[in-house]
Image (cartoon, grey):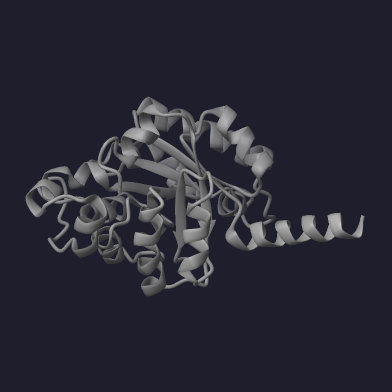
Amino acid sequence: MPANPTFLDRLKNGSPALAAWCGLPDPAISALLAREAFDAIVLDLQHGAIDFTPAMNAVPLIAAAGKPAVVRISVGDFAAASRCLDAGASGVIAPMINTLEDARRFASFMKFPPLGERSWGPHGALTVSGLQGGDYFKAANGLSVAFAMVETREALGLVDDILAIPGIDGIFIGPSDLSIALSQGRHMDPTSREVEEALDHALSRARAAGKIAAVYAASGERAAELVRRGFHLVSIASDVSLIRTGAQMALKAARA
């Protein structure tokens, strides 16, 4: 959780950030990827094999590499957002934010009063940030980045209102689920014309609101395209796909 500049400052004012997406439960994997040139590490508690305890064990290892940890919580588990921040995570992604009430509840767990209702108990965050309690309290709302996921028709239709909620720092777009929603379940195609139009729309609305637009990319090539389009944070592939790709490349070279 770098305090100067903050993760939020880095996303708003720096060059586009690239994140590694991790779902495997061994904290050593995310710690290893944090030592590479990624700008952040995402820990996926929604669909990954990783659960809360190993994810929180990974946070200080990621921080030791000088990188921010971002956690995607399970659907509706907003209380877990506060626990992730207490452990030292720099950001939280909340999936399936489909109503304004969803967004407000998520924001309330992400920010201390008067902005939200987060309660006190940053056991790991004090160590990770290097701040004393009072200083951390003053800075914490700027250190915790709240990403509301936009992955349904409902969320896309409310994107301006979601972005306007105090405490929501940005949106994170899930192209696969968005493609399922926009096609009414007919197919899953994260690069379909409907998804491409939705990405451009969501990105423009986030920029107009002065907030962060983040997105998932299935490959480095797709990530490069989304970076060129102006997304602030792009998460690349997953730890599983990175391992498989590395293995395939090594085998191909060995058998050449």
Tell me which corner region of the image, top left, top right, bottom left or bottom right, holds residue 250.
bottom right
| Front in this rendered view, residue 252 or 230 | 252
Q: Quadrant of the C terminus?
A: bottom right
Q: Residue 51's x, y, as percent? A: 43, 73
Tell me which corner region of the image, top left, top right, bottom left or bottom right, holds residue 12.
top left
Q: Is residue 98 visible?
A: no
Q: Residue 68's x, y, as percent? A: 38, 49
Q: Is residue 136 visible?
A: yes
Residue depicted at 32% across the width and 38% down the height? 8
Q: Residue 172's x, y, as percent? A: 45, 46
| Front in this rendered view, residue 125 or 159 | 125
Q: Residue 57's x, y, as percent? A: 37, 69
Q: Residue furthest left?
A: 134
Residue depicted at 41% across the width and 43% down the height? 171
Query: Relative to 11, is 152 above or below?
Result: below
Residue depicted at 37% across the width and 55% down the height? 64
Question: Does residue 66 appear left or right of residue 112 in this picture?
Answer: right
